[in-house]
Amino acid sequence: MKGTAQLQERPDTAVRTGDERAARTGGLAQRLNALRAGVLGANDGIVSTAAVVVGVAGATTAPGPILMAGLAAAIGGAVSMALGEYVSVSSQRDSERHLIEQERRALAADPEGELRALARSYEERGISAATARRAAEELFARDALEAQMRERHNIDPDEVTSPWHAAVASFLAFAVGALLPLLAILLPAPDLRVPVAFGATLLGLAATGAVAAGIGGGSQVRAAVRVTVGGALALAATYLIGSLVGASGIV
C-alpha cells in the first residue's frame, strides 16, 4: 500500500516539477531575449554611427566635424533607442499588470471555479482528474495567483518587466556599439580613417550578427554575411554622398 501511495503521489510531483521547469525555462528565455536585444542594440549603434562618420569623412578630413557628427549620432541614437524601449516595455508591463489584476479579481469572486479551471488545464495534459485536482489544490494552497498566472499567461506576478531596466540596457548597448566606428574613424591617420572605419565596422557587424543568430538558434554564417553586406552598402552610400558634397564645395 505504501508503494501504491507513493506512485499516486508522483503525478503531483510531476506537475509541480513541470511547472517549475517551465518557469525556469521561461526565465532563461527572457534572459536570452534580453541578451539578444542588447546585441542587436549594439549592432544598431555600430552601423548608424559608422554611416554618419564615414559620410562626413567623405566630405572633410577635419577631425572636428567628424567627432561632432559621430557624437551627435551616438547620443541621439542611444536616447532614441532608450525611449522606444521604455515606451514598448511600459506597454507590456501595463498589460501584465492588467492581467494580474484580472486574475486577482477572478480568484476573489470565484475561487472554486478558478481551481476547477486550473485542474482542467492539467487534465488536458493527460493527467487523471483526481491527480489534477490534487495538484491544483496544492498549488492554490501555496500561491493561487502565481499558479493561475503561470499556467494561463506564463507570467510570474513577482517579476513584472521593468521599463527602466530595458531603457538603460538599450541606451548602453547602442552607446557601446557606437564607440567602435567613432574610435576607428578618429584614431588613425587621415588617409587611413575611412578604410579602418570600414574594416572595423564590418567586423563588428559580422560579430554581432553571428552572436545574435547564435542566441536565436539561426545560422551564424548567414546572419553575419547578411548584416555585413547591408552595412557595407550603407557605408558606401553615405561615403559617396559625403564625397559628392565635399567635391561640390558646399563643405
Image (spheres, rainbow, N blue to C red):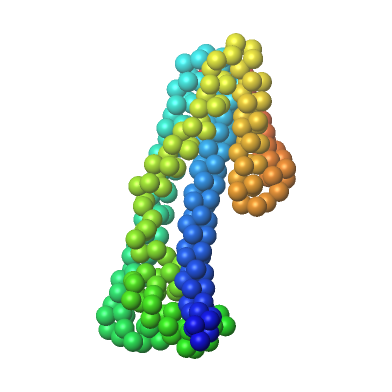
Residue 147 lies in quadrant: bottom left
Instruction: Name the outermost residue toward the left.
Output: 108
Which residue is at the front of the view, 231 or 94?
A: 94
Q: Is residue 92 above or below residue 71?
A: below
User: What residue appears at the point 38 percent right and 56 percent down from the top-left corner?
Assistant: 161
Q: Is residue 16 above or below residue 8?
A: above
Which residue is at the front of the view, 102 or 1?
A: 1
User: What residue appears at the point 31 percent right and 80 percent down from the top-left corner?
Assistant: 106
Q: Is residue 74 visible?
A: yes
User: What residue appears at the point 71 percent right and 48 percent down from the top-left corner?
Assistant: 219
User: What residue appears at the point 63 percent right and 26 percent down from the top-left corner?
Assistant: 200
- Residue 3 lies left or right of residue 221; in this view the side is left
Image position, residue 220 (x, y; %) = 69, 44
Image position, residue 26 (x, y; %) = 50, 60
- Residue 244 lies left or right of residue 144; in this view the side is right
Image position, residue 113 (x, y; %) = 36, 87
Q: Is residue 103 visible?
A: no
